[in-house]
Image (cartoon, helix red, strand yellow):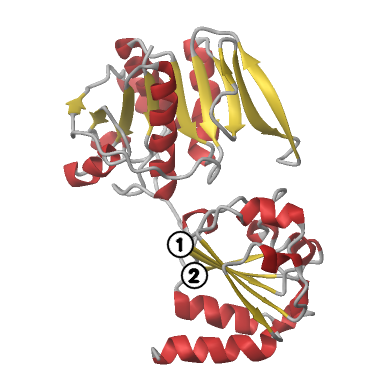
Amino acid sequence: MSVIAFAKNWEGKFKKSTYELVSYAKDLASRLNTQTLILSIGEVDESELNKLAQYGADKIISVDDSRLNILSSRIYAEVISQVVNKEGASYVILSDNNSGKAISPRLSVKLKAGLAAAVLDVPKSLDPFIIKKRVFSGKAFAYVQIDSEKKILTLSKNSFGIVENPAVLNIERFTPELADDIFKIKVNSVEKADDKMILADADIVVSAGRGMKAAENWQPVEDLSSVLGAATACSRPVSDDGWRGHEEHVGQTGKVIAPNLYFAIGISGAIQHVAGINRSKCIVAINTDPEAPIFSIADYGVVGDAMTVLPKLTEIIRSGE
C-alpha cells in the first residue's frame, strides 16, 4: 500500500514543484503508515537524486534510460504502471503540470485507478478517501471520493508547500520491459521559450495591479523585476483589461504561488488575490492608499506612488547600496 510519486526532471534537474510533490507524498504516506517511493525516469545524476531524499523519500526508483529523456505520455504511463505493480503501490502522485495532465489519464486506465486532478490538500478522510480539488477551471472547489483500490492524484502547484524531512539516500535501479514498437513515435526537435522566469518556479515575484493606471506605465515594474531576476505577475483586473497576459494573473482564479519574496505594487488586496499569494514568505506592498487591505498581510509596506518609488528602489538595488 505504498505511495509512489513521479518526480519529473527538466534536462536532468528537479524544480521546486518536484520537492513539493515529494513533501506531499511523504505526508500522505505518513498518514497511511507506509513508505514514500519516488520514481525518476530518464538520465539523472545521483547528486540530483540525493536532493529528493532531503524531502522524505524512503526509496528512489531510478529508470536511467537515455531513450526516456524525452517525455512521451504513452511510454511514461507504461513505465509508471510497471513500477506500481512491482511495488504493490496503492497511491500514485503526479504534479498537476503538462506532463502530469498527459500521463495521469493513461495511467488511470492502465491501473483501473480512480483519478482526482488538481488536488489542493491532504485527504479530508482516508476511509472513505475524500479529497479537495479544483473544479470549473479553478473557479470553485469540490470534495471528491475515490472508491477504487488504486488512486491517482495530481497535485496543484504551491498548494502544499515544501517540507524538508531528510532521509537516508536509498536508490534502486529499475529496467522496465518495453517493446521496440512503443518507441515508434520520435521527437525530432524541441523548441523552448526560456527567456522568461516561470511564475511557479520563481523565488521572487514582482506583481502589479490597476494602481499602475495604464499598460504603458509597466516599465518600472519590468525594470525592478529585471534587476532582481524575478518573475512578473499581475492582478486579475489587469489581465482582464488586457494590460498583461492571463498567464501572469495570480490569485484564487489564476496562478497560486508561494515565492520567498512577493512585491504587490498598486494592488488593493482583494480576498481573491490574497488567496493566491498568502503563502509567500515575505510580502512587500507599495500603494498610495494607507488603508489598502494589502497592508494587513504585508511584512513591509510603502505608502507612495509606484511611479516614484519603483525607479528609486530599482536604482538602490542596482547600485548595491
Please report the residue visible at 58 percent of the width from the left and 90 percent of the height from the top: 311
| Quadrant of the image occupied by residue 131 | top right
> Residue drawn 53% across and 46% down?
158
Question: Can residue 184 be seen in the rendering of this structure?
Answer: no
The image quarter containing residue 292 is: bottom right
Specify the label residue 235 is tagged with. Answer: none
Q: Amino acid at mark 1?
A: Asp
The image position of residue 257, as x and y in percent, is 56, 53
Along the horizontal axis of the image, is 199 left or right of 189?
A: right
Left or right of residue 244, residue 191 in this image: left
Question: How far, Cα to Cα, is label 1 from label 2?
Answer: 7 Å
What residue is disc 2 on? 230
Q: Dot 1, how many residues are within 10 Å of its Cα: few (below 14), some (14-19), or many (20+)?
A: many
**Dot placed on the residue nearer the N-terminal end, 1 or 2:** 1
In the rendered image of this protein, does residue 283 appear above or below residue 274? below
- Mark yes or no: residue 199 visible: yes
The C terminus, quarter of image: bottom left
Q: Nearer the viewer, residue 70 or 257?
A: 257
Q: Are marks 1 and 2 in contact (CB under 8 Å)?
A: yes
Q: Dot 2, how many residues are within 10 Å of its Cα: few (below 14), some (14-19), or many (20+)?
A: many
Query: Residue 84 in the image: x percent, y percent?
Result: 36, 16
Q: Position of residue 184 (x, y in %)?
A: 38, 28
Could you tell me which residue is drawn at 46 percent across and 57 percent down? 192
Q: Mark 1 = which residue?
A: 203
Residue 157: % across, % down: 53, 44
Q: Horizontally, is 125 left or right of 161 in the view?
A: right
Q: Secondary structure at mark 2?
A: loop
Q: Is residue 213 above or below residue 112?
A: below
Q: Residue at x 38, y 14 (%)?
A: 89
Q: Nearer the viewer, residue 45 or 150?
A: 150
